[in-house]
Amino acid sequence: MKGTVLRSGRGTGEQAGSGIATLPGGLGTLPGGLGDSPDRPDGVQKVRGEFAFASDLWMDAMLWGKTLRSPHVAARVRAIDTSRAVAMPGVRAVLTAADVPGRPTFGLEVPDQPVFASDIVRYHGEPVAAVAADHPELARRAALAIEVDYEPMDAQCDPEAALHAPPIHPDGNLFRHLVIRHGDPSARGDVVVEGSYAVGMQDQAFLGPEAGLAVPGDDGGVDLYVATQWLHVDRAQIAASLGLPVERVRLYLAGVGGAFGGREDVSLQIHLCMLALRTGRPVKMVYARDESFFGHVHRHPARLWYRHHASRSGELVKVEARVVVDGGAYLSSSNAVISNAACFAPGPYRVPNALIDGYAVRTNNPPCGAMRGFGAVQVCFGHEAQMDKLAAALGMDPIELRRRNALTRGDRLVTGQVLTGAVPVREVIDAAVAHPLPPVPAPDAPMLARPGGAGATADASHVRRGVGFAVSFKNIAYSEGFDDYSSARLRLEAGLDGEPTATVTVATAEVGQGFVTLAQQIVRDELGVRRVVLAPASTVDVGSAGSSSASRQTWMSGGALQLACAVLRQELFGRAAELWECGSSQCTSTGSSVRRGDTGERLGIAELLARGPLETEQELHHRPTKALDPDGQGDAHLSFMFAAHRAVVDVDAELGLVRVVQMATGQDVGKALHPLQVQGQIEGGIAQGVGLAVMEEIVLTDGRVRNPSFTDYLLPTILDMPDVVASLVEEPEPGAPYGAKGVGEPPAISSGPAVLAAVRAATGLDLCRAPLRPEDICLGGHPA
Amino acid sequence: MPPEPAVIADRYELSVNATMRVVEDAWIGETLLFVLRERLGLPGAKNACEQGECGSCSVLLDGVVVCACLVLAVDAVGSEIQTVEGLSASGDAADIQAALVRGGGVQCGFCTPGFVVAIYDLLRRNPDADEMAVREALSGNLCRCTGYGRILDAVRAVQRARAS
Ligand code: FES
Ligand code: FES
C-alpha cells in the first residue's frame, strides 16, 4: 500500500534532507496525464512576472478605492460627516451605509454582517465608509477626512463571558452549541487524564493582498475582476446588496495570490461594485497589508478542555471535551468550524463513549472563519496532548497507544458514522515513524542552525532536542446535508492546425493549489487529447464550482470534469459508430483514437472532430450527507483524510527559543494524481502548521489588533522551515474520482501539535498553548 | 491631516531595463514599486506588504537587490533599474525560472518574481552557496504557499546545472 521509492521534484535530481515517497508510475499512459507531474500551465507566466494578479489589473481612467474602518472595538456611530471628503478635488464618491442600494448586510451562511456599519461597530477595523478618488493617496486622505462621531461602548472580548453577556448583535452571542452524545456517557475508565489547552488566532497571510477591479456595465450591472475562492457565492452576496439580479453581476477570477480560507468571505467586493456603479467609472482597490489583516476573517482562537478515560491496557473508553471557539463579531463559517471541532475532537481514534460540547460564540473580536483545516486544527492540539498524557499515565509508548486505538475501516466515529472508505491511520503513523531521525548538530554547526538563528543568541550547550508526534483527521468537502456540487464545461474541437483541442471552462478558483494542472491531466487521460486549454474562470460561462476549500476541488471539480469527458467520449463513439455503421458499444478509446472492436479499425479524434465541435456541461454532486441529530449523531460527512506528523525540535529553554529541525509525515492521499503538487501541498501546509506552533498569532488587547503587519505578525521564512520528509499512503478512496482524496489541509493539522509535543519532550514543560511564546518556555509553561 | 494638495513632480526619467522611461504628473511620494506597477506597466514586482518585509517587490537598483516598496521613485533617478521583466527579456534568469516551474517552486506565484530576482542575485554573487548560505540569502523573501522546499530544490538544480 505504501510506496518506498524516494523521488524528488521532477527533473531536478536528488535532494539533501527532503524527499517524498510514493508509488512509481502514473495511472494513464499519456505523458502529462494523471500520476505524472507535468508543469503547471500558468508557471511560465508566473516566473516571468507576466501573470495578472488581481492587484495588477489596470484600466484607463480608473479610480482608486479606499475603505475607512473603525478604530474602535465597539461603539455607537452617532453621525458621519463626509462633506470634507466629498469636497476634496479628485474625490469622486464617498459612500456609507446609507448608500447601500440593496440588502444592507452580507454573510456566507447568514447575512449578519453590515456592508458598512450604520449604527454600531462591533470590531476593530469594521468598514464604515468607502471612497473613490483619482489617486490612491488622495483616496487615503479623503477617507481620513471623513468625520465619524463614535460613542465607544463596552466590548465583549471573552468568549466564555460573552456566552452569558447581553447580546452584541440582534442574532445573539451564541452562534451554535453542538452536543455529541455517543455510547454510554456515564462510562468510566481505569485511567483518567485531564487537560486544558488554548490556540491563538492565526492569519492566512496569503501574499497577494485583497484586490479587485470593478467596471460598470452598459446594462446597469457591473463586471468585477477579483481574487476569491468562490465566484458564485460572492456574486449572490454582491447582487443582494446591490439590489441587482444576479445576471447583472458578472464575476471573473483575477489572479489569486494564495487564499487558505481567507478569501471565502466577501471583503472588498461589494464596496468596489458600489463605487463603480456610483461613479460610472472603473474602480480598483488593493488592500495594503495592514488593511488585509482587518479585511478578512482569521482562524478561530479556541479553548479546549478534555478528559480522556482508558482501560489499563490502553484502550480508549471515553472522551469528554468542551470546545469553545471565538467567532468574533459576525458568523462567517463559524457553524461549520464548530461542527468540525466537535466531530473531530477525539482525533482519529476508536472512542466508544463520548460527551462533547462545542460552542461557537460571538464576541467583539475580529470575525473568524475559514482557514486550512478549520476546526480540526484547533482540537488536534488538545487531543494529541491528551494522548501523550494518557500514554505517560499508562506507562505506554505514545505511538503504540495511538496505533492501538487507531480508527480502521468499519469503525464508528463519535457521531455514529461508520467508516466505509479508506482509513489508513496505522499506515500513516508507521510511515511517519519509519523516516530516519536527523543527526544531532555538531558542536561547530553554524549559528543559523541553532534556535534563534540569525539572532546568534543560543549557546550550543543549552540546546536540547525533542521529538513529538501527532495524528489527525478531517472531512473532505461540505458536510451536514449541504448540496455540494461543481460544474464543468468541456469543448472539443479541431484547432486551426487540425490538432484536437479541449477547452475546459470551470468556475473553480485556482488559488495556487494547481487545479489548472490537474484539469489538463484529467482531459489528457480521459480523452487522449494533448492540447488542453483552460478558459478564464467566471460566473458568466459556467455554473458554480463551489469553493476552493475543504480539500474538495480535486474530488468535486475534478469529478465534474471527469463526467464531462465521459459524455464527450460517448459522443465521439457515436460519431465513429455512425461512420462505421456499427453500434457505439463496439467502440473503445485507445490513446488519441477510437477503435472498433470487431474489425480493429481506428478513427483519430481529429477526424471525428472534422464534423464540428462537441461541447457539454456537467455537474457533480457528491453523495448526500445528513444533518446531525440533537445528540450529534448522523452520517454528516462524505469522506476523511488522515495524516501523522513527527517533529524534531531543538530548544534553548533558557531563552525560550525553538528551532524546528525536521518534520516527517505520512499522509493518506488516496491516490497521488500529481505527486509533485502533492509534495508542494505537504510542505506548504507544514509551514503553516509550524508557524501556528511557534510564531504566528494575531495579538489582541481587548479586541484591538496589535500586530497587523509582517513586521509584527511573523511568518516562517526559509530559515525557519524544517526539512520535510514525506511518505504518501495510497489506498484508493471508494467513490472518489480516481480514488484520490484531497491533500491540502492535513499537512496543516497535526504538524503544529507535533511541534508542541516535541518541545514538551525537550523541556519537560506542560506547554498547552499554541503558538508557543518564548516566555511560555523560559517561565516554565503557561496556563491555558 | 497631511498637507494638500500633494506635491506633484512635473517630470522625471527612470532608466528601467536599459530603457529611459518618462514619468509625468506623478505625486512626489510615490514609491518605485508604485511607479513601476501603475505608471510604467511593469507589474512584475509585487506588492505583498509594501513595508520591506516580504521581498515580493525585489528589483535590482544599480545591480543591488532592493525592496522597490522602500525606494521613492524620484530617488531612483540616475540609477539603473532592473525588474523581473528585464531579466525575463534578457534571458539572464531563464534557467532559474525554468527550474522553479519544473521543480514545483511555484504555487500561487505571488512571491515568485521576487524569488527570481533574489536567486539571480545570489547565484551571481555566490554561485556555490551552500544550503545555509542559500537559506540566509533568501530569508528576506516570504512564500506562504510552498514551504520553500521546492524553491530550495530549484536553486540546487540550477547550481548543479551551471557547475556541469
Ligand atoms: S512589498 Fe516590498 S518588501 Fe514586501
Ligand atoms: S507561491 Fe504563493 S506565496 Fe509563494
Image (tube, coloured by chain):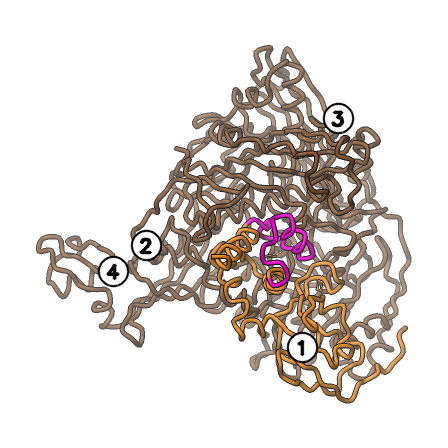
Chain colours: A brown, B orange
Residue where numbered disc 2 is placed:
A525
Amino acid type assigned to the residue bearing label 2 in the image:
Asp
Q: Confirm or deny contact between disc 4 and disc 2 (CB under 8 A).
A: no
Q: Amino acid at mark 3?
A: Asp
Q: Is mark 4 within 8 Å of ligand 2?
A: no
Question: Who comes first in sequence, dot 4 or dot 3?
Answer: 4
Subunit bearing disc 4: A
Task: Name the quadrant containing residue A56.
Answer: bottom right
Residue A151 sits above or below residue B76 on the image: above
Q: Secondary structure at mark 1?
A: helix
Helix, strand or loop status at disc 2: helix
Q: Does label 1 lie on the same chain as label 3?
A: no
Q: Which mark is residue A766?
A: 3
Query: Residue A757 placed where, x, y %?
Result: 67, 30
Image point 72% across, 25% down: which residue?
A195
Q: Residue furthest left?
A: A599
Which stretch did the figure color magenta? B124-149
**Amino acid type, residue under disc 1 in the picture:** Glu
Is A595 covered by the magenta stretch?
no
Q: Where, quadrant-wise, is the C terminus of chain A in this rendering?
A: top right
Which SS type dominates the magenta stretch?
loop
Along the horizontal axis of the image, is A362 left or right of A353? right
Examine the rendering and report whether any part of residue A98 can be seen: no
Q: Are marks 4 and 3 on the same chain?
A: yes
Tell me the kind of residue under disc 4: Ser
Q: Position of residue B93 (x, y in %)?
A: 54, 67
Give the camera-side residue of A397 and A256: A397
